[in-house]
Image: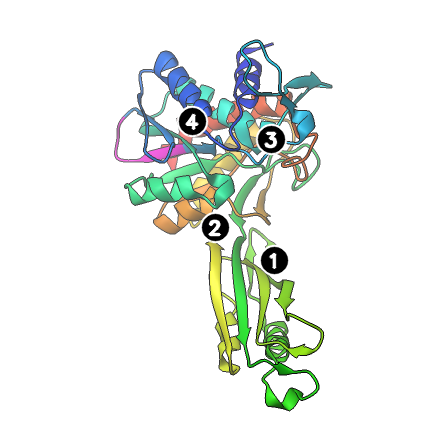
Amino acid sequence: MNELDELAAELVSIPSHDDETAAGERIADWLDAETAASVRIDEAGNVIARRGSGDRSLALVGHHDVVPPDESQVASETLDGADEYVVERRDGRLHGRGSADMKGAVAAAMLAFRDADPSGELVFASFAGEEQGGVGAQAAIESGFCPEYAVVGEGSTGYSAPGVTDVAVAHKGRRASTVRASGQSAHASNPSEGENAIYRACDAVDELRALDVPTVEVAGEELSGSLVATEVEGGTAWNVVPDACEVTVDERTVPGERAPIERVESISGVGVEIEQDLPPMRCGDDAFAETVLDAAAEAQDAAPELVTKPHATDAGWLSQAGTTCVVCGPAEPGEAHTEDESVSLAVLERCYELYRGVAERWPAV
C-alpha cells in the first residue's frame, strides 16, 4: 500500500454520517503534522488550510461527511468498542462508505496540497454538511471564504468515456418546492358546498406541466432543466371534500434562467414554498478550465474532455459567491451512495497528480 491508499482507507473507516467531528479532526491533525500550513476547524466543522502567498488563490475542495451507510458497511465490534466503517480492497478498488463520495478525493487533495509548489496562495477545504444541502460550504462563505479559483473533487470520471477523468465545467442545481392548495371542506354528497383543494392542486400541476424549462449550451453539450411533480398528499376521508392538498415538486435548474413556478399562485387558493434551492454551477473562465484540462490530460493516457454534470455540488455555492469553479474527481456515475460504494485506487493516484498539476500551473490563467 502507498501513502494515498493508506490515507484514503483511514478516512473512509471513520464514521461521519451523523457526526463529522472525528473525520474533520483527523484531517486537520494530518495537515498540521504534514504541512507548514495554517490549519483550522471552524464552528461548522469545516477544515480549512492555507499555504503560500500571492494575489491569486486556488482551493482544492471536498467534503468529509457521508450519507448513512448500509448495515454491511459498518463493523459494530472493534477493539475499542466503537463503530467503524468496513474498508476493503478488491480488484484494485477501495470499498467503503464515502470512498467515492468523497473521502478518496479528499485524501488525494490533502497529499497534493502538501506536495505542490504553488506560485500563489493554495487553499485546502473539506466541508461538513454537504449531504445536508451544503450547510458547511454556506457557513464558510458567510464567514468570508471566497478563493478566486477552486477545483471541487466530486466525481467527473467516466463521463466522456469509461475510465476517463474529465473536467466538469457546469452542473445542474436542484430546487425543491411544495405547492399548497387550500379549499373548503364539505360532505361529498354536496360537493358544490365546498371548494375541492385536490382540484385546485390538479390545476396547479397542469400549470407546471405547461411551463418551458430552461436549456443552456455548455462545452458543446445541451444542459436541460426538468420539473416533476413527485408526491401528492391530500384528503381525509372518502366522503369529505378535501380542504387541503400538497404537491411536492422536484426541479433541476441550469445556470441562468429559472422556470417561473410562481405562476401557480394565480390559481385561487394555491401558493408555493421553496424548501431547498441548491444552485447550479458554470465555469466562466475558459482559460482556467483549459488549465485544469491540461493537467488532467497530463495525468492520464486518455484524452479527457470538458463535460457537464447532472448533480448539484458545493461548487454551486462557491460559484454563486464569486469563486470560479470546475469539478474534477475520481468517482464514476453510479458509484456513490450504494451498498457497494468503491473507488479506483489507480484513479485516486491520477487525481493526486491532477490536483498537484493544477496547483503548480494555475497562475498561468
Instruction: Give whichever of discs 1 and 2 has the lower sequence position.
Output: 1
Which callout, 1 or 2, points to the residue nearer the camera? Answer: 2
**In the image, which disc is placed on residue 281?**
2
**In the image, which disc is placed on residue 38?**
none
* Circle 1: residue type: Glu
How crowded pointer 2 is (Cα within 10 Å; few <14, some 14-19, many 20+) is rated as many
**In the picture provided, is 127 more to the left or to the right than 294?**
left
Instruction: Give whichever of discs 2 and 4 has the lower sequence position.
Output: 4
* Circle 3: residue type: Ala
Q: Residue at x 35, y 16 (%)?
A: 32
Q: CA distance from mark 2 to mark 3?
A: 21 Å
| Residue at the disc numbered 1 | 222
Q: CA distance from mark 1 to mark 4?
A: 40 Å
**In the image, which disc is placed on residue 21?**
4
Instruction: Give whichever of discs 4 and 3 has the lower sequence position.
Output: 4
Q: Quadrant of residue 45?
A: top left
Foreground: 311 or 177? Answer: 177
Q: Is residue 11 visible?
A: yes
Foreground: 171 or 118? Answer: 171
What range is drawn magenta here? Answer: 53-59
